[in-house]
Structures are given as C-alpha cells and as structure tokens.
Amino acid sequence: MRVKDHPVLSFPEREEITFTYQGKEVTARQGETIAAALHNHGVLELSKSGDKLRPRGLFCSIGKCSSCLMTVDGVPNVRTCITLAQEGMVVEKQEGFPDLPREAEPLEPSSTETRETDVLVIGGGPAGLKASLTAADAGGDVTLVDENPFLGGQLIKQTHKFFGSSDLDAGTRGIAIGDDLVGAVKAHENIEEMTGTSAVGVYKEAVGLYKNMEKFVKLNPGKLIVATGATEKMIPFPNNDLPGVYGAGGIQTLMNVHGVKPGKSAVIVGAGNVGLIVTYQLLQAGVDVQAVVEVAPEIGGYFVHAAKIRRFGVPILTCHTVLEVVGEERVEGVRIGEIDENSELLQESTQYLDVGIVGLSVGLSPSYKLLAHAGCELQLNPVLGGYVPIRDQRMRTTRDDVYVAGDASGIEEATSAMLEGTIAGADAAIELGVGGGREEEKIDDCLNKLKDLRAGPYYRELRKSIQGVEIG
Ligand SMILES: Cc1cc2nc3c(=O)[nH]c(=O)nc-3n(C[C@H](O)[C@H](O)[C@H](O)COP(=O)(O)OP(=O)(O)OC[C@H]3O[C@@H](n4cnc5c(N)ncnc54)[C@H](O)[C@@H]3O)c2cc1C
C-alpha cells in the first residue's frame, strides 16, 4: 500500500526491480529495503520466532531488533529492514532458528582489510554527522560508518518542523536538517563514508566493521566516537510480538522514507512528543488513527502537537493502557482500558478497537553495547533511558580514546545530539593534534548552547542525571 498525496513528501516513481519471495516474483522500488517492499505487497509476517514459532514482523526498522530476520540468498538472519532489495535476490521466510548454511566458509583473505584512520565515527545520525564534519574541518581524516543504507539516522524520517531552541534549527523540518548535514559530509574530502556497514566489535588493536555482508574491515582509529543512537522500548502485554505492533520510529521509516503505509487503522500508545508526532504523520499519510492511549494522567508532549491531532478528532485517552492485542497471525484489534490512581483497571471502561496497527511510543534506550564492549564504564540511569557511559563534559568516556555523543549518551533530542557531536569531534581533533585552532571556541560555544537548551524547571531531572554521569 503506497502513500499517495502526502502534504509534505513526494514519492516519485523509481525504477522497479524484481526479487523472489518464497519462490514467487515480487517487485520493489530501487532503493527500498526488502521489508518495506514486502509490506507494500501486504506481507507482514517475515519469520517465525526461534523457539515457539510465533509470527514476527517489522518492529524497529533501523536494524536494532531481531523481528525482521530472513534468509537472503542463502544467508540466514539478515536484517531485512536495513537491507536493500536487489534484482534477482532470493528471499525466504525463516521458520524457527535457521541452519548455518552448509557452504559457510571462513572469509577469503581478499575479503578482509586492515586500515587506519584518525577518527572513526560509528553512527551517521545528527550526532555522528556533526562529529565527522567537525573533526574533518579541523583537518582530521575521518571514517564514518552506518549500518543503515542511508546516512541521517532518525532525521531522514522527521517530516515535522523541529522543536527545540530557536537558534538551533527549531522550526526547520528534520529531513531538511538531515539533507544539509549529509550533503556536507558527502562533499567533504576528509570524510570517507561507509553505509551498509555494521560496527560489530571493539578489539584491542582495531574496531571490527562488517560491510554489506561481504567484507570484514579492521579499522584502527586514533580516536573512536560512538554515536549509535537509541533503541525503541517495548512494554509487556499479551501478543505484543505480533506483526502489526511497531515501534513509532519503525512506522515513520515505512511511511516517510519508503512511502509505504503500515496499514489502514491504528492505535498509538504513548502521548509524548514522539507518539503525538507519529499520530499526526499517520493521519497525513491517510491512516485512520482511532486513539492515542496514555497511561499517565497528563499528556507528556507539547500542547501544539496534541492540538494538531485533536483537530483531526483523534481522542487522547489519558489514564488508559493496552490490555492485549487480539489476533492470531497479525494484529486484528486491541483492547484498552482505563486505570485508577492505584493503577487498577476500571473493568467497565474496557473497549475493543478494530485496528491493524499498534504503534508503541514508550521511550527509547541508549544503544550502549559497543561502549560496553570497549570497556567504558557505564551507569544505569533511568532518566537518560538506561545504561549510559560515564564521561566528561567533552564527551570523553572512561577510555580516553573513546567518545560518545547523541542518544547513545542519554536520550535527548537531535539538537543536543548535534552539539555533543561537535564537542566530541572538536576534542578528538585537539587530542590528535590536528586541530586548526578554532576547536576550543567551538567547544565553548556548544557547551553554552547545551546549558541554554537544558535550562528551566522542565529539565531539572535531566540536568541532575547528566551531572550524575559526568566526571570532573
Ligand atoms: C518520532 C520522533 C520525533 C522526533 N522529533 C524530534 C524533534 O522534533 N526535535 C528534536 O530535536 N529531536 C527529535 N527527535 C529525536 C531525534 O531524532 C534523536 O534524538 C536524534 O536523532 C539522535 O541522534 P543520534 O545521532 O544520537 O542517533 P540516531 O539519529 O538514532 O543515529 C544513530 C545512527 O547510528 C547507526 N548505528 C547504530 N549502531 C550501529 C553500528 N553498530 N554500526 C554502524 N552504525 C550503527 C544507526 O543506523 C543510526 O543511523 C525525534 C525522534 C523521533 C523517533
């Protein structure tokens, strides 16, 4: 189901390619992921789970969960949400744990490579893009890797005008901010960009990168900047694993990047800014949103976002929660109900909504695994979203050659991610001795902007939490 007549986006016709799914030919648009192409053909179930053979569909759509694993050209466990469909590909559904392919051989020597770089940036979202540009502007030689096929991180799907500070891109659409940054990175002669490349481990002598399922690169950086973003959280309720239950960002990727509607009707869980924005974007794409369900007594997002969706007549039901998803193979409906001040269900309040999409917008947790792998000290910090690395104001972790920036350092916004990325990139350049002289000034400017951004009573807890993980 393609999105048509979108008020912000256009999806011009692109060349079509053909691949096979379960032995049948299906079409995809050039530049579309396998999972998006299958969704367009109504295929929601991508695999059966390892142990209980439960149906599994797309959830995060950024390569961070295991919901979309399929066998592609004989290779099992391929993340089809970040793998582009290619002409002639053979795609098969996995039923339980897959076998290792019989012909699996160690990689040929020609498919491994060992290299050096001044700065390796992992993650091409706003934090990583800014870190790369800053270190490269200073004269450093930068390698930027991202496991998604496109640079931009979460920005490539943010069609709304950004909230945040007025002198820091507020009022500009996220996609426009992303386009500018990605354009600058692509044009920069000091930056080598490697998309479709996963950083899989941090070792003593190198960082291991796996490129396009073909090549293993051992990259030895002078400084490493980890800007791996965040992962969508899940909440427990019966059938929360059925195809049709998506993370909010997963819905955005399908609709706003690939122009594919996730379904016809939806319920969104969570009335923070992300939930409200995704609701509005679903409405823009022509999806019927029946309700936004919020367990707290108050809406967490900004009034302006709530007002927009109320104008469409979508109710925002506070003190409500999801009781269960109904369906066998996919979401067929959802039961919701109201809770009292003791979190007890008010039995008479339960209602069934006939929808095919349940969108979860219940928070994000920092993607910290590579930092843990690198031996950086971590702290569990609920306000910042989960485990975050201990660091100083210049984003240096407890390993002096490893930096962090953006959501990986604690969940905030793209604006703070860009400021932190700039700080990390500038400090890495100074430490490597490649700085052009303006880096200290840039760091001071960003630190002041971060202070302004986090000012005010609304951010009191956040400020306290950040101080709690900062050294020095
Ligand atoms: C619906 C929604 C609306 C939002 N609206 C706003 C808004 O209005 N204003 C605002 O300021 N912020 C907004 N945000 C938040 C903002 O998008 C994020 O805070 C920001 O994108 C974080 O930037 P980042 O660079 O840290 O991470 P990301 O943008 O998530 O980028 C991380 C990148 O790292 C890559 N990566 C991860 N692991 C690896 C690995 N092992 N190897 C290689 N690559 C890897 C990922 O593929 C990804 O591209 C919104 C977020 C959402 C979901």
Image (cartoon, grey):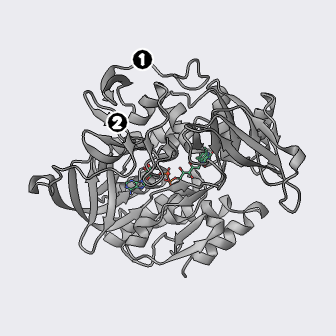
User: Between residues 226 and 184, which one lies in front from this camera angle?
Assistant: 226
Relative image position of residue 265 (x, y in whole percent): 66, 29
Label 1 environment density (alpha carbons within 10 Å; few <14, some 14–19, many ≥20): few
Question: Which residue type does callout 1 highlight?
Answer: Glu
Q: Tell me what residue is drawn at x 54 percent, y 58 percent.
A: 407
Q: Name above or below for residue 64 compared with residue 286.
A: below
User: Between residues 77 and 457, which one lies in front from this camera angle?
Assistant: 77
Badge number at residue 84: 2
Q: In which quarter of the image is the C terminus?
A: bottom right
**What is the secondary structure assignment of the residue under circle 1?**
loop
Relative image position of residue 41 (x, y in whole percent): 46, 24
Q: Name above or below for residue 50 compared with residue 310.
A: below
Which image quarter: residue 249?
A: top right
Name, please, the residue furthest toward the left: 109
Relative image position of residue 232 (x, y in whole percent): 56, 53
Is residue 81 something that shows in the picture?
yes
Badge number at residue 368: none
Q: Tell me what residue is drawn at x 44 percent, y 55 percent.
A: 51
Question: Which residue type does callout 2 highlight?
Answer: Leu
Mark closest to the chain's N terminus, 2 or 1 = 1
Relative image position of residue 44 (x, y in whole percent): 50, 34
Is residue 318 something that shows in the picture?
no
User: Between residues 42 and 393, which one lies in front from this camera angle?
Assistant: 42
Residue at image mark 1: 13
**What is the secondary structure assignment of the residue under circle 2?**
loop
Q: Tell me what residue is drawn at x 30 percent, y 56 percent.
A: 142
